[in-house]
Amino acid sequence: MNSFRVLMMKAKRWIYLCVAGALLLGVLSVAEAKKLVREFSGSRSAITAEFEVEAPWLIDWRVSSDYYQSMGVSIALINAEDDTHAGSVAKTKQPGAGLRLMDEGGRFRFRVDSSMANWTIKVEQLNEGEARHYTPKTSDAF
């Protein structure tokens, strides 16, 4: 009877370790889902440096200002290879933030037209599992 108890205790310990390991792997895979590719920020108009991403990816933008009545920001996505307009990311006259899921990869840059505003743009690489949490915006949506 004692050997059976010892065997059952070892089995329970093994099950707990397996469950803990599975949970840890799940947490790590979620933590590694997003990868920051580039971050840009400024307080005036600018054209950012080029960056390269694969689909799917996320544009995370934020705008703030001390001059709410006079501010304005427009953010456009530009194809880096031929300098053509790839889409409008944001256009606002108020502080705010937004996300845009992109389902086409490539080499890009942003054109930011800013008046009396501070802006930050993050480009984040996603995996397929993370991308399912967002609604995609294709080039047809621009």
Image (spheres, rainbow, N blue to C red):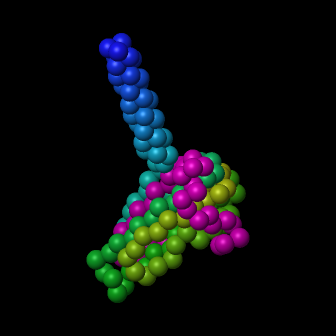
Is residue 28 or residue 5 the one in the foreground? Answer: 5
Quadrant in which the N terminus is drawn: top left
Q: Residue furthest left?
A: 66
Q: Quadrant of the C terminus?
A: bottom right
Quarter of image, res 111: bottom right
* Residue that sits furthest to the front in the current view: 1
In the image, taking residue 42 as reference, residue 112 lies left or right, namely: right
Residue 37 seen by the camera: no
Q: Residue furthest top?
A: 3
Instruction: Assess whether residue 136 is covered by the magenta stretch.
Output: yes
Q: Quick check: 133 above or below 25?
A: below
Residue 91, x across and y down, in percent: 51, 77
Report whether 113 appears left or right of 84: left
Please say if 16 is above or below 97: above
Q: Nearer the viewer, residue 74 or 28?
A: 28
Tell me residue 35's x, y (percent): 48, 46
Q: Is residue 133 magenta?
A: yes
- Seen at 43% across and 82% down, the residue is 93
**Quadrant housing residue 64:** bottom left
Numbered marks: total: 0
Left or right of 111 in this view: 103: right
- Would residue 125 be visible to someone looking at this image? yes
For the point 48% across and 48% down, the residue is 34
Highlighted magenta segment, given as a residue range? 113-142
Give the answer, above or below, for where 113 lies relative to 131: below
Query: For residue 11, what is the image quadrant?
Result: top left
Residue drawn at point x = 37 percent, y = 85 percent? 70
Q: Position of residue 5 (x, y in %)?
A: 34, 19
Q: Residue 75 location, x and y as percent?
A: 52, 69
> What's the residue at 38%, 31% (across, down)?
16
